[in-house]
Amino acid sequence: MKNYITPNLQFFDLVPIKAQGSSVWDEAGREYIDLFGGIAVNALGHCHPALIRALEDQAHKLWHISNLYLTLPTKELAKKLVQHSFAEQVFFANSGAEANEAALKLARKYAFEQYGPSKDKIVSCCNSFHGRTLFTVSVSGQKKYQLGFGPLPPGIQHIALNDTEALEKHLDDQTCAFICEPIQGESGVIPAESNFLKLARRLCDLHKIVFILDEVQTGMGRTGKLFAYQHYGITPDIMTLAKALGCGVPIGAMLTLEKFAKAFAPGSHGTTLGGNPLGCAVANVAFDLINSAKTLQHVQQQGLLFRQKLNQLMSETGKFQSIRGEGLLLGCVLQDRYQGKARELVQAALAAGVLISQAGPDVIRLAPSLIIQAEEREKGLARFEQALKQWNP
Ligand SMILES: *Cc1c(COP(=O)(O)O)cnc(C)c1O
């Protein structure tokens, strides 16, 4: 069969045609339980009625008008994000990579204007993931995503996550930005330690470095708090969001304080579609549904129940060596003898009727709907159990 899509995208052998809640159906009418949430995007499951209504209502009013005009849904979403975070101002983009691109450009611009051209170093973590534009892929600490795309932009250094000595050594007066994920998502659901983030905050203050937290995957309730930084008693200078912000409509955001935002003078950065009213209308309703005590408690409670079952599967099968993560972002680390085989297990789970994802070659990632129901959880995990027990690579 002819491939109409470029081969960088590798598709599983399943054609989803409709979905509802945490269920997905293929062309033959077979049902699958979704425990990966479209890679932590579908925070309110599939086809949530309130989101459909928001999309339909806005579709009759205004889809796009460009950033020459500020529309009501865009203004409302920015206000909500500011009122419920450390931030004072928001820049909207279409994706996580673009939100990070804006964050990194802003940090460089701010340092340039405040301190001159030599404060341009960016420090990031090994194995981090910040997107696929050339700048964000260069800042991401994964060589395999950079190979062959050079020359890469200079002035970027990588340190090991949770290495406080490296932090002390690399964050200096020439550094303009430090960027970090509260939990490294794509590389295997690896949490940053509280003392590492707190030290980063102190060193950023000391050396006048912009502290960027990439919450593209951890933000919007995923960890049981609205934003993951709220677990640590620190605030960043810039935070980026995308994935669950639109629950499936493409939208990203960079949130910051006015004193940094000022460096983005009129015209110095921009976007055509970023913050368009269609996406923002959906994100507004999604925000209210996620930012409720009920939903956030549900995430914490379901997170514990998932963890319980996964721990049980770990001791029964011996196929995992640890379960890690926070809230409903969970990683099952494969035992050494199954290293490199995460994709095979994802394939086996698919055959058993449950959708999961891998985070790197050795880790299974679960990121189900934040409002997953008990029956959906049980059914999905039962299928996962069956696949895991039969799996004999
Ligand atoms: C997914 C992800 C990105 C990239 O987002 P895109 O929307 O794919 O550009 C950036 N950072 C983190 C932490 C992510 O998980």
Image (cartoon, rainbow, N blue to C red):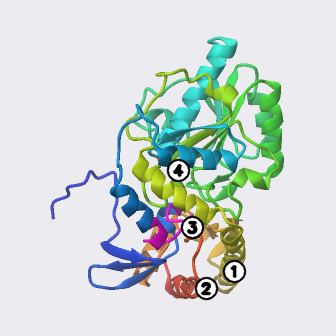
Q: Please tell me whether the stretch drawn in magenta is mainly helix, strand or loop.
A: loop
Q: Which mark is residue 242?
A: 4
Residue 96 seen anywhere in this rendered image of the structure? no
Q: Residue 360: x and y, percent? A: 54, 58
- Judging by the rendered image, the residue that carries numbered circle 2 is 374
Residue 267 seen anywhere in this rendered image of the structure? yes
Q: Quadrant of the N terminus?
A: bottom left
Q: Is residue 163 left or right of residue 363?
A: right
Q: Which mark is residue 305?
A: 1
Q: Nearer the viewer, mark 3 or mark 4?
A: 4
* Kind of residue at disc 2: Ala
Q: Residue 190: x and y, percent? A: 67, 56
Quick check: 4 above or below 269? below
Q: Residue at x 65, y 11 (%)?
A: 116
Q: Earlier in the sequence, mark 1 or mark 2?
A: 1
Q: Is mark 4 within 8 Å of ligand 1?
A: yes
Secondary structure of the residue carrying numbered label 1? helix
Secondary structure of the residue carrying numbered label 3? loop
- Judging by the rendered image, the residue that carries numbered circle 3 is 367
Give the quarter of the image for residue 240: top right
Q: Earlier in the sequence, mark 2 or mark 3?
A: 3
